Image (cartoon, rainbow, N blue to C red):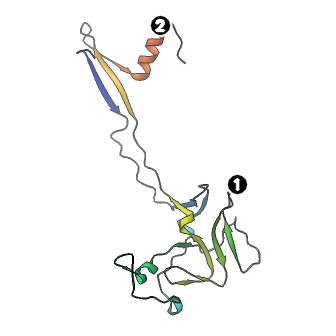
């Protein structure tokens, strides 16, 4: 690089910040095929052990995994519960059944339903139970916009006194024109 050349990195739209994640509903997809299964608006919220009959499991004060007790382990939910069945779900007159991914090519088992209800891992009894296993569902996050960085070379023409800016793309085009070749 000559003394007359200066390399510059130009960030486009540096004045505008990256977009924050959208405030809309979060989407959840099948872990195997990434097909969107439901949104956060369709989730049923439930509080751990909110009913008197909620604790069918016996909770012992036995240490599990260091200083985490069995009671605290039960409080974390391992399933998502939906308020209503989805249009793609098998809505036969069955009282219980399996929920499969709506993608025809995937069809992996992602949960189960039981109109009589089922117990969550946190201890709450949920009726009716449209339960999707968290380990088979991925939450999808909004992606922030990342600015594009472009390299440029500035060469100063001492006779004219004006700087000439050449981007990497225009330098390639000029080199092809000088050699008489075409740009691929």
The N terminus: image quadrant = top left
Q: Residue at x 45, y 59 (%)?
A: 23
Residue 13 visible, this orientation: yes
Image quarter of residue 62: bottom left
Q: Nearer the viewer, mark 1 or mark 2?
A: 1
> Left or right: where does residue 52 sit relative to residue 17?
right
Image quarter of residue 3: top left
Q: Residue at x 66, y 62 (%)?
A: 108
Q: Compared with residue 15, is residue 40 higher up or lower down, i.e. above or below?
A: below
Task: Mark 1 or mark 2: name the one nearer the start of the chain.
Answer: 1
**Image location of residue 26, percent across then percent down:** 51, 61
The foreground one among 49 and 15 is 49
Give the residue number, with chain letter if any, for mark 2.
Answer: 179
**Image location of residue 109, percent across then percent down:** 65, 66
Q: Residue at x 27, y 11 (%)?
A: 157
The C terminus: image quadrant = top right
Q: Compared with residue 112, is residue 11 higher up or lower down, i.e. above or below?
A: above
- For residue 141, the mark is none
Image quarter of residue 92: bottom right
Give the residue number, with chain letter if any, for mark 1.
Answer: 105
The foreground one among 95 and 32 is 32
- For this orientation, the residue located farthest to the right is 93
């Amino acid at each position: 690089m000559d003394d007359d050349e200066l390399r510059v990195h130009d960030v486009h739209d540096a004045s505008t910040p990256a977009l924050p994640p959208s405030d809309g509903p979060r989407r959840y997809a099948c872990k195997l095929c990434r097909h969107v299964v439901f949104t956060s608006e369709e989730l049923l919220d439930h509080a751990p052990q909110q009913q008197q009959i909620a604790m069918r499991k016996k909770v012992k004060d036995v240490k599990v995994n260091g200083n985490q007790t069995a009671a605290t382990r039960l409080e974390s939910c391992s399933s998502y519960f939906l308020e209503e069945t989805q249009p793609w779900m098998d809505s036969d007159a069955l009282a219980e059944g399996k929920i499969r991914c709506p993608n025809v090519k995937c069809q992996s088992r992602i949960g189960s339903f039981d109109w009589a209800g089922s117990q969550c891992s946190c201890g709450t009894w949920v009726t009716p139970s449209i339960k999707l296993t968290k380990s088979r569902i991925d939450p999808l996050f909004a992606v922030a916009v990342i600015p594009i960085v472009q390299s440029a070379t500035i060469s100063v023409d001492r006779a004219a006194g004006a700087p000439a800016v050449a981007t990497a793309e225009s330098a390639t085009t000029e080199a092809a024109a000088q050699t008489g070749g075409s740009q691929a």
